[in-house]
Image (spheres, grey):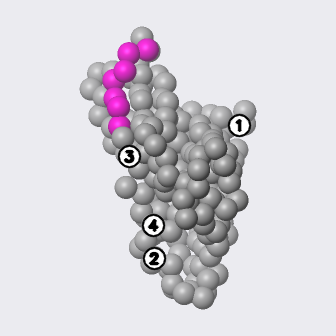
Amino acid sequence: MRVCPFQTSEAQIVWARGFEISDGVYNLAAVVKNPNFDVQLVTQYKFEAFNEENLLIKELFGSATIPPLGTLPLFEPTILTGSQNIARVFLRLVGEPTWTRAQPIEQTVFVTDRTLSDTDSIPKLSVTLQNRGITPARDLAIFSVLYNIDGNVVQSSRTYVPFIERDSTREAFFTWPEAFTGDVTKIDVYITEAPLL
């Protein structure tokens, strides 16, 4: 059942960033929250990437469904910028959003361990996932966010796990081609039940 927008709280854009993977190659990422406990949001979004002179160099559109009380990562990989560097990234929700009544999604897959290694060469993050549900989990998108001691996001990535049998565990891996600058002090991992397009 549709809900009028004035009966809802607006979605919250927690952060949006560009992450340099190599010269002229970036990943764009953002995190959006739906604060409503019984309303699902379907929305269009737009990434905008600017250079040091505040000139727009990339614009990317997509769509997202955010469940009640959901936190959804958005990720656009391998953005080619040529000789330009991305200095700032903004995420905007565009168009007319659709709000419908829904129940929060019950989480069945949990992170039980995370190990970051080789941060001064080719960083690698290993994450152990456990399916505590009564059915297999399929088509999982796993999104990692790494923070420094000041609480700033310093890197992120996304990978996929196609299948985890019920009552079982599976590893997911993330790698980056270049060493990190500074220490990583916190790692968040988000799990969605279907691939992010």
Residue bearing mark 4: 194
Residue 179 makes an appearance in the image: no
- The label shown at residue 138 is 2
Q: Amino acid at mark 1?
A: Gly
Residue bearing mark 3: 62
Label 2 neighbour load within 10 Å: few <14, some 14-19, many 20+? some
The reply to whether callout 3 and callout 2 are in contact (CB within 8 Å) is no
Q: Residue 185, how many percent across, how many down?
A: 70, 44
Quadrant in which the N terminus appears = bottom right
Residue bearing mark 1: 151
From the viewer's perspective, is 9 left or right of 119? right
Inter-mark Cα distance, 1 to 4: 28 Å
Magenta stretch: give its range: 54-60
Mark 3 or 1, nearer chain start? 3
Mark 4 or 2, nearer chain start? 2
The reply to whether callout 1 and callout 4 are in contact (CB within 8 Å) is no
Inter-mark Cα distance, 4 to 3: 15 Å
Going 60% across and 63% down the picture, which residue do you hit? 101
Quadrant in which the C terminus appears = bottom left
Going 53% across and 75% down the picture, which residue do you hit? 170
Is residue 136 positioned above or below 85 on the image?
Answer: below
Mark 3 or 2, nearer chain start? 3
The reply to whether callout 4 and callout 2 are in contact (CB within 8 Å) is no
**Foreground pick, 134 / 9:** 9
Q: Amino acid at mark 2?
A: Arg
Q: Residue 195, how many percent across, how many down?
A: 42, 63
At mark 3, the secondary structure is strand
- Kindly report the secondary structure that dominates the magenta region of the rendered protein: strand
Mark 1 or 2, nearer chain start? 2
Mark 1 or 4, nearer chain start? 1
